[in-house]
Amino acid sequence: MSMDLFFRIASQVVGGLGIFLFGMKNMSEGMQAVAGNRLRHLIGAVTNNRLVACGVGTLVTCLVQSSSVTTVMVVGFVNSGFMTLIQAIGVIIGANIGTTITGWILVLKIGKYGLPILGVSALVYLFSKHERLRYTAMCIMGIGMVFFGLHTMGAAFKIPEVKDVLAEVFSQMAATTYLGVLKCALVGCVATMIVQSSSATLGVTIALAQTGIIDFHTSAGLILGLNIGTTITAFLASLGATVNARRAAYSHIIFNVVGTLWVIPVFFGYLRLIEWIVGYWAEPGEPLNITALIASTHTGFNVVNTVVFIPFIGALSRLVSWLVGDPPHKETPHLAYLDVRMLDTPSIGIQQSLDEIAEMGRHTSKMFGFLREIVTSKEMDEELVRKLFHREEVLDIVQKEVTEFLGSILSGNVSHEVVTSGREQLRMADEYESVSDYIAAILKLYIRAEKEEIVFSEQELAELLTLHDDVSAYVDMISVGVKGGYPEIISKANTQGDAITFQIKELRSRHIERVGEKITTPLHSLIYADILNAYRRTKDHALNIAETLAGEK
């Protein structure tokens, strides 16, 4: 084979594979953008019910077009505390069924129309002003790219010199014996681990089968291997993550490995069943569609595995919990572990960041509780003081992580809905961080008063505690609105906010009277006034959160 021919073939194969994978990415992004809130509601619907979790995993994977993306996303959810291990295993098992949709898309007999579909949908995507139409066109453009990429690879494989060489190579691992099946599974596994995409391995396998380089049995052996190889992505994502996240990744590995191993002994009988099923639906006298055979093998394999494993999800959970023991100390989930893992699923990633912002609200509520306990104690509790300041530092870090995470999501190809939600969340994260700053500032003022031996009168302390309780309840009310997604909370926020503002003005007026009567010292007066001002600013930042939730500028 001449060098020129070699480079021409290599460029066609690599180029075709690149177009295929880029098409899968565009199809996924288009589907996610069109699905929008429905995709987020799917994840929110995950419960400890095994069938529901499995169904969610199947549907989400059909939308994102990658079981690797789904499992990595689930590892991220478990890592952040958003999903339990039992829920995660159910979703992961369902994801294996969802990933088989790729094969069925390729069964469609539109291969020669791939380029026209790509061209027409690209024009609609580039020139349409309607966002939903644009992303629908993006999804169809992805389908066109998938078929065009597959056609390009197939054209390279049909060149006689290439076909002969590849046929010789694959003859060494023909799945005519159980040893041959194991060889094929190993090749499929290694190939998928290298490219970290089961869709890529599936696409190449179908291209090889369509050109007659490999037969149905060999392609089915390769399919078995890609089910194991696809687990590498979730495993890599779990490195450095929490214990439960690692358990979720290991459950994915165990499920796919065990599922593959038990199929091998019945491999040839299973394939005869697949050939009978596909032949039953085929036209009499027509040769069986090799792509339909491969897609049926892939789907049947994963559906059977799922049905077999569903009753044993609890046992699998206990097994991985035993393999990955409990940590020596309590682990704190962090959004930082999710910034890379959610970029392929912005519609779900944006929901995850909202949950993290709601968690910021919980932190501020804790800080209010610590502050009240410190102020009402006879002696200042140094441990509580340390805890409050630590919470303020945590919120600084979380706000930074949320900003970086959302910045990464918004820099991608995302819908207007995701962009709007992202911008609103950036503002809410900033406002919550400011609330924590003012709570810490109030504590610093009390510490300063103690150092200066300033003692607030019973009346002053009662006034400040009443104000504290009102502002704390106000922030909690808005946090409930953020967590539940209630934009109508703005009505209560405005009413109660005005009441707190009036309350602070009343307290300031009474304090000015005390100053006029020379009951307080100038420094005493200054600290009291600064505390009032800090509570007012806390209320203002909380109101900003409610306004953002309501979509107000």
Image (cartoon, rainbow, N blue to C red):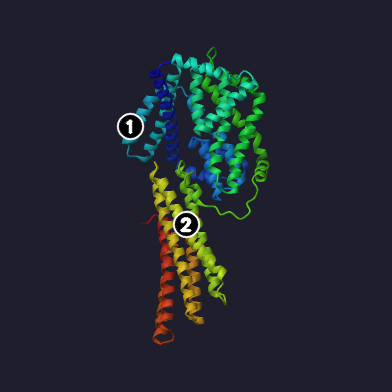
**Compared to 117, does 496 lie above or below?**
below
Horizontal side, residue 273 vs residue 470: left or right = right
Q: What kind of element bears circle 2?
A: helix
**Compared to 48, does 17 lie above or below?**
above
Counting from the top left corner in percent of width and height, residue 45 is at: 55, 45
Counting from the top left corner in percent of width and height, residue 226 is at: 56, 30
- Looking at the image, the residue that sits furthest to the bottom is 517
Q: What kind of element bears circle 1?
A: helix
Q: Disc 2 residue type? A: Ile
Does residue 8 show up?
A: yes
- Looking at the image, the residue that sits furthest to the left is 127
| Tag 1 residue | 123
Which residue is more in the foreground, 381 or 517?
Answer: 381
Which residue is more in the foreground, 434 or 163?
Answer: 163
Q: How many marks?
A: 2
Q: Residue at x 56, y 76 (%)?
A: 379
Counting from the top left corner in percent of width and height, residue 397 is at: 47, 57
Crowd band around label 1 with a 10 angstrom C-alpha radius: few (<14), some (14–19), many (20+): some
Does residue 52 show up?
A: no
Which residue is more in the foreground, 316 or 18?
Answer: 18
Counting from the top left corner in percent of width and height, residue 87 is at: 60, 44
Q: Disc 1 residue type? A: Leu
| Tag 2 residue | 397
